[in-house]
Amino acid sequence: MKQQETILVLDFGAQYSQLIARRVREAGVYSQIIPFNASLEEITSFQPKGIILSGGPATVHEPGAPQPDKELRTLGIPILGICYGLQVLAMAYGGNVSRPDKREYGLAHLTRRSESVLLDGIPDSSEVWMSHGDAVDSLPEGFTVTGSTENCPFAVLEDNQRSCYGVQFHPEVVHTPSGKRIIENFVRGICGCSSSWSMGSFVEQAVAEIRETVGSRQVVCGLSGGVDSSVTAALIHRAVGDQLQCVFVNHGLLRKGEGELVQRVFRDTFHMQLVYVDAEDRFLSELAGVTDPERKRKIIGKIFIDVFEEEASKLGKIGFLAQGTLYPDVIESVSASGGPSVTIKSHHNVGGLPENLKFSLLEPLRELFKDEVRLLGRELGLPDEVIMRHPFPGPGLGVRCVGEVTPARLHALREADAIFIDEIRKAGLYGEIWQALVCLLPVKSVGVQGDRRTYEEVCSLRAVTSEDAMTADWFKFPPEVLSRTANRICNEVDGINRVLFDVTSKPPGTIEWE
């Protein structure tokens, strides 16, 4: 296989590292994230056309502050430092970093100071997103200042002779409108990449890697009907065919019509080997009386793996468990590769796995965002009814049934959720929303239905817009859509007599309630 052009992102523990890689891919160049302390040998093995040093939470002067290999500069490869990465780069070339009196968080106005290859095609004055306490205060020899802000005189540094560049702000986030152009200038103009990478080339590379990894062994994959597991199965099936055994576990926590959809698409259309397992009673008996969300996730994850191990014993010797893990799952569940990131919540596909797991994990989507996964699904021939569905958590309705999970509460939640999605589709809004869901709350409300008093549970509607699920804002519905939804739920669903609408953004809230 031909060596593809690659930009490496050295991760210093920033939650934005994957966004950097994503912007590079959007520029048509393949990107790969590796830890900040990767050896020179590992770095050169990728034959990178350029290297980007990410931001990070550390301070360059603190003991043990993350530093890349000291010989990185000797490679003669263009380097772009972002925020903390700029500070590391500046100090490596003899500059100084200090903590100024005025720090910058949020929007700032960048002013161009001189001719700049990094800022080519960008207005002389533009908005950028800052998030730093430290800043460069002494220019390294050979560098020139090409951009500054009111509180950051060294906001953009360039050394064309040594192909070293740095920005104190974050070009990868949407709050920096010209950020994509800056990254394009680096990967195309400075690194000379041809912008030949596409989802089609990703499929080619991923298929080759899966074949090499799997060899002649068997793979088992859990299908839930969600985008992630569906694309995972389609990609692995493209690579190894009938070496893939798909298992559809009905844990009683699925959306309405999930089972029928999965079997129709994957067994009847793609002709995959698909095993149906009815484990609803098993899951619900273990979840009885459990209200803590983390315990729920761990229980669901454990049973999920137990079921897989049992099915694997029937299918023969299985070498790999395939999972549709995406980057937002990883960033919320474990620390980033190079530094401290706070664990927000675990996901059953990346958390709660037993230490004695009998399979090796196969996670071919681990470096992708949801919109990229959808593009991949379309490349693999999956229908829109699968790849354009809103995200659905691995633990399913178990984490939308806030409080105790019971058959009656699940039934009410499933019906309410189906009504909400139906009304969104009827209004032609489904494609404008990143994720829509209903949560059933462990709160009872007095109501009046007909001539009788009711005392039933409350549900909350939630719909958000987002680019990557790392941040999200609530969707502004026309009032009549919410009105019709609430009216239908209260009239058609037993056990619910009040409907709320959640207007919390992320942050401070997560998209899911649990």
Image (cartoon, rainbow, N blue to C red):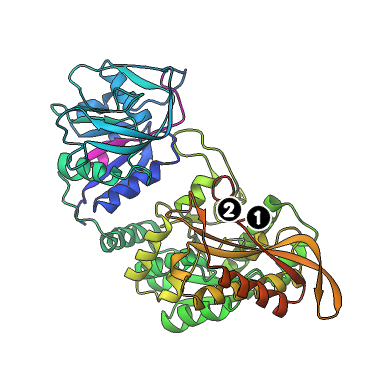
Tell me where residue 175 appears, x and y as whole percent. Answer: 38, 44
Of the pair 158 and 462, the residue shown nearer to us: 462
- Inspect the image, locate mark 2, and give the three-letter code of the amino acid beneath it: His
Left-right relation of 298 to 214 = right
Magenta residue span: 42-60
Residue at x 16%, y 51% (from the top left corner): 194
Of residues 489 and 219, the one nearer the viewer is: 489
Magenta-drawn stretch contains 273? no
**x and y percent of residue 341 in the render?**
52, 37
Along the line of sight, which residue is nearer the eye, 482 or 190?
482
As for residue 57 lying within the magenta part, the answer is yes
Tag 2 residue: 347
Above or below — where is 436 with respect to 136? Answer: below
Q: Residue at x 69, y 53 (%)?
A: 293
Q: Can residue 49 be seen?
A: no
Q: Are marks 1 and 2 in contact (CB under 8 Å)?
A: yes
